[in-house]
Amino acid sequence: MESVAKLQAKKGREKITMLTVYSAGYAALLNQTGIDTLLVGDSLGTVFQGKADTIAVTLEEMIYHGSAVRRGAPDKFIIIDLPFMSYQVAPLESLRNAGELLKRAGANAVKLEGAGEVVLESVRKMTAAGIPAVGHLGFTPQSVHSLSGYKVQGKDNASAVKIKADAKLLEQAGIFMLVLEMIPAQLAGEITAELKIPTIGIGAGADCDGQVLVLDDLLGLYPKAPKFVKKYAALDKQITGAVNNYLTEVLSGKFPGPEHSF
């Protein structure tokens, strides 16, 4: 299994690989691969639950899915998202909720978005308590409403300067890794070069220290996907094709055959 120290040692030497997953079955398959880390993201709200955004995802749902992934992938380093309003109110509450993800879901680390004062103090308290924390800047899905939708961040000088400053503040607060989402590749490269900790990109170009995608997107389970997604399979067509074959064989009486009967 990877560790905080091993992941940090890869910076500038070897790319870090990460995939987002929500279920024990998929996690068990990934446990057989060389993927470094698994992320149980609150994107389960949109990908798994079919909601418009991640806002309604609860801590209990993160624990439920995190536990499933841990059972499926006992050998992987697992990061679990702190959902909306589980860490934005008070640092001590953030600390308690992060502890729940470690105790009840088997997380190795937690991830939280933004770099406001409560977030920074929460990271400090988590670090002091021995809870590894991952930051997340750029497009932060829990702020989708204030960001006016799913848009690339850091395109103008002022916002780019702020993202850079926030990255350094988070590093100083104690995060051991930083996710950069939907920002210009040049900005992501500059941040990566200036930080001592690894960066993980999603729609942030090739210069980050690692990359993350949602497994469902990688497998091509949806006809539409963000620009930053590369589909490595087309399981949507394979699944619908298999179901239609099953339907045809049941209706025709071909299935089940003698070999499927007792």
Image (cartoon, rainbow, N blue to C red):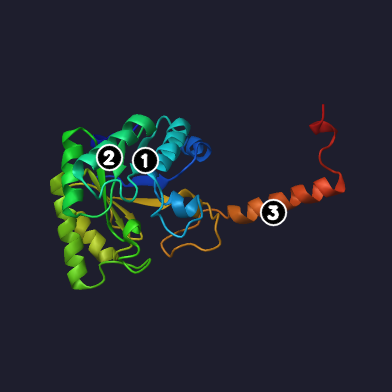
The residue carrying pointer 3 sits among few (fewer than 14), some (14 to 19) or many (20 or more) residues within 10 Å by Cα, namely few
Q: Amino acid at mark 2?
A: Leu
The numbered mark, 2 or 1, whose residue comes first in the sequence reads 2
Which residue lies under the disc numbered 3?
A: 241
Give me the residue at 35% from left, 58% from top: 141
Which residue lies under the disc numbered 1?
A: 37
Q: Position of residue 187 (x, y in %)?
A: 23, 64
Q: CA distance from mark 2 to mark 1?
A: 9 Å
Farthest-out residue, bottom: 156
Q: How many marks on residues?
A: 3
Which residue lies under the disc numbered 2?
A: 7
Give me the residue at 16% from left, 35% from top: 128
Quarter of the image that includes the N terminus: top left
Whether pointer 3 and pointer 2 mark residues with C-beta atoms closer than 8 Å, the reply is no
Q: Quadrant of residue 36?
A: top left
Q: Amino acid at mark 1?
A: Thr
Q: Quadrant of residue 75?
A: top left
The numbered mark, 3 or 2, whose residue comes first in the sequence reads 2
Whether pointer 2 and pointer 1 mark residues with C-beta atoms closer than 8 Å, the reply is yes
Does 55 sit left or right of 121 as displayed?
right
